[in-house]
Image: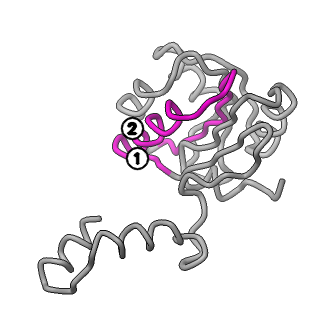
Amino acid sequence: MKAIEILDQNNWGITQQHIVSGLSHVISSTGLKGRWQQLSEKPLIICDTGHNEEGISEVVNQIKAQTFQKLHIVWGAVGDKDLSTILKLLPTHATYYFCEPKIPRALKADQLATLAGTFGLTGEVIQDVNEALLKAKQNAAEHDMIFVGGSTFVVSEIENL
């Protein structure tokens, strides 16, 4: 949005309609995946690559706008980031599945679970992203919601459902 603002200041003529159209077609236009991407309908499974305070704040607002019975969150993160500003935003009523992406920067899932616990977030430690998602799917009912996120690296490891 900042880039659009700068382009608009330089008379590029970008309209609100252009912005809405562009955002509505991000995946097909760019190949970028994981921006509030729906992976399944029953249960509703959404992934998002938001990984900073602003992005997670938007994700949480989107989650609040959904209709579901129970919320399951598959969550992983990198270890070189201050997660306190992010974890305090996450819903405490969810069941968490703490995982870790397969990269050297990953925060170990057990360390993430311990840190998350200080913010009232509880759940299971399942290192592998796809195993954590599978466990969430096994525990979820048809009218539940599963959210997968915390890191671009977590979302990138999701295998085809």
Residue type, numbered disc 2: Ser
Quadrant of residue 136 within the rendered picture = top right
x then y, percent, for residue 104: 60, 53
Q: Which residue is mark 1?
A: 55
Is 111 on the left-hand or right-hand side of 130?
A: left
| Vertical side of 37 occupied by 92: above or below | above
Q: Which residues are magenta?
A: 50-79
Q: State the residue at coordinates (26%, 72%).
A: 3
Is 24 on the left-hand or right-hand side of 153?
A: left
SS under mark 1 = helix
| For the residues bearing labels 1 and 2, Cβ distance under 8 angstroms | yes
Q: Which residue is mark 2?
A: 57
Q: State the residue at coordinates (64%, 32%).
A: 73
| Vertical side of 123 occupied by 132: above or below | below
SS under mark 2 = helix
* Residue 60 painted magenta: yes
x then y, percent, for residue 51: 46, 47
x then y, percent, for residue 147: 64, 38
Q: State the residue at coordinates (56%, 39%).
A: 107
Is 137 on the left-hand or right-hand side of 109?
A: right
Q: Nearer the viewer, residue 153 or 16?
A: 16
Classed neighbour count for the residue bearing mark 2: other residues with Cα under 10 Å, few (<14), some (14–19), many (≥20): some
Q: Nearer the viewer, residue 108 or 52?
A: 52
| Vertical side of 119 occupied by 17: above or below | below
x then y, percent, for residue 161: 84, 53
* Residue 26 painted magenta: no
Residue type, numbered disc 1: Gly
